[in-house]
Image (cartoon, rainbow, N blue to C red):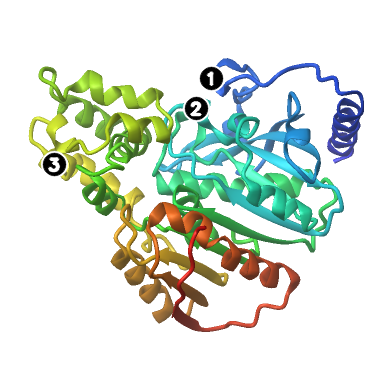
Amino acid sequence: MLFASTLLVFLNALSITAMATGKHDTEPMPPQDDPWYTAPYNYEYKQPGTILRIRAAPGNLSSVMTNATAAFNILYRTTDSRYLPSWAVTTLFIPKHPKDVLLSYQIPYDSVDLTFSPSYQLYQDPPSDISRALGLGWYVNVPDYEGPLGSFTAGVMSGHATLDSIRAVKAAAFGLTANAKYAMWGYSGGALASEWAAELQLQYAPELKLSGAALGGLTPNVTSVMLAVSGKPAAGLVPLAMLGLTSQFPEAERYLLSRLKKQGTFNRDGFLKARNYSSVQAVAAFANQDIADYFIGGFSDITAPPIKSVTTSDGQMGYHGVPQMPLYVYKAVHDEVSPTVDTDTLVSKYCKINVAITYVRNPLGGHFDEWTAGVPGAMDFLQTILTGTHDNTGCKTMEIASSSG
């Protein structure tokens, strides 16, 4: 413990000195090119959430992020979707005027290319939500919850990595006490990680007493999403989801690759280009394509047993546990990415087993509009949760019109 405390004091001093002088020893590198993003020997024998490596974030990340005084990368031990040892990285921001509060903010990075992991992309496009939280004095934790394989939509991996990032941050301390309040927030892919963390918390991390979670644009069923967007503007999410999910399951991945056509306009090479795309690039590249055209047997290949087994176990919410914290769920009624009925069903299921849920359905806009339209409500919820003034113990569903403008 003494060594760990000394190390953290040193890292704090290092970060403060770097900001004061404007000089940094290194510049950020993509995770796949940065040797720091590797697990040390015998890491698998450590407990989940154990810090394996820690550093002051390279470059100017703390100055890029408004209201932060320092930023750290933490590499920690976690558990993948097959319940085998794995690792992940999180980025911790220290606020200028810290309170004993931690927000775990899951970014929807929706890519299987590690270049688009938050710990690297935060330098380019820092979300304003993080700065807003830092301005309230909250520490902010931003995990690369897809892990070292870029396992987009892999629910168990994402949930474990999110919970273990909170464990690692608590172990690192940086001013947070044992009595600190902490909550989660995520939209779309970020809500996927947050919901799975909430669902898995009791069985996987029972010592974590989360105050609540704000979940926007939920995608409770990966198969429903793929069917909903194929042939439409967001069709590029399908190859990303299939490649990300099967990265956790070698047998399913082999089957997936074996069913891709080798010839024709829609072929294996074109499908696999998604491995190097951001979500924005994939949406542009596959826009309005029927992704079934890439497969020998069409969509029946996507629902065949080797794939269905993993989309059921790792891509369908509501079957791994019951959230033990209040939830704020917000959803566009006309969500074009994930059918709203899936979220309605999940909320109803949890309400019947006494989860405290505030569910806000927005009749205006769609999935991408709700990303910004839902922010004020989510922030209001988080503030009441983290200040101890939240008093909702039951379930309530409201339809509230709000625009993203």
Point 60% across, 61% down: residue: 206
Image point (91%, 32%), residue name: 13
Q: Which residue is mark 2?
A: 114
From the viewer's perspective, tell me whether residue 87 is left or right of residue 21.
left
Q: Position of residue 42 (x, y in %)?
A: 60, 26
Judge whether 69 appears above or below 114 on screen.
below
Residue 70 visible in this rendered orientation of the protein: yes
Q: Amino acid type of disc 2?
A: Leu
Q: Answer with the quarter of the image where residue 399 lies.
A: bottom left
Callout 1 amino acid: Gln
Q: Crowding near pointer 2: few (<14 within 10 Å), some, many (20+)?
A: many
What whole-number distance in Å separates the C-alpha atoms at marks 3 and 2? 28 Å
The first of marks 3 and 2 along the sequence is: 2
- Camera-side residue: 42 or 230? 230
Q: Are marks 1 and 2 in contact (CB under 8 Å)?
A: yes
Instruction: Tell me the residue at 28%/39% (across/down).
Output: 238
Residue 83 vertical placement versus 369 (above, below):
above
Q: Position of residue 5 (x, y in %)?
A: 87, 39
Q: Position of residue 342 (x, y in %)?
A: 31, 64
Tell me the quarter of the picture where residue 267 sits.
top left
Tell me: 239 left or right of 376: left
Where disc 1 sits, the SS reads helix
- Answer few, some or many: residues within 10 Å of disc 1's Cα (few below 14, many 20 plus, some between 14 and 19): few
Q: Amino acid at mark 3?
A: Phe
Instruction: Report the residue marked by disc 1.
Output: 32
Residue carrying label 3: 299
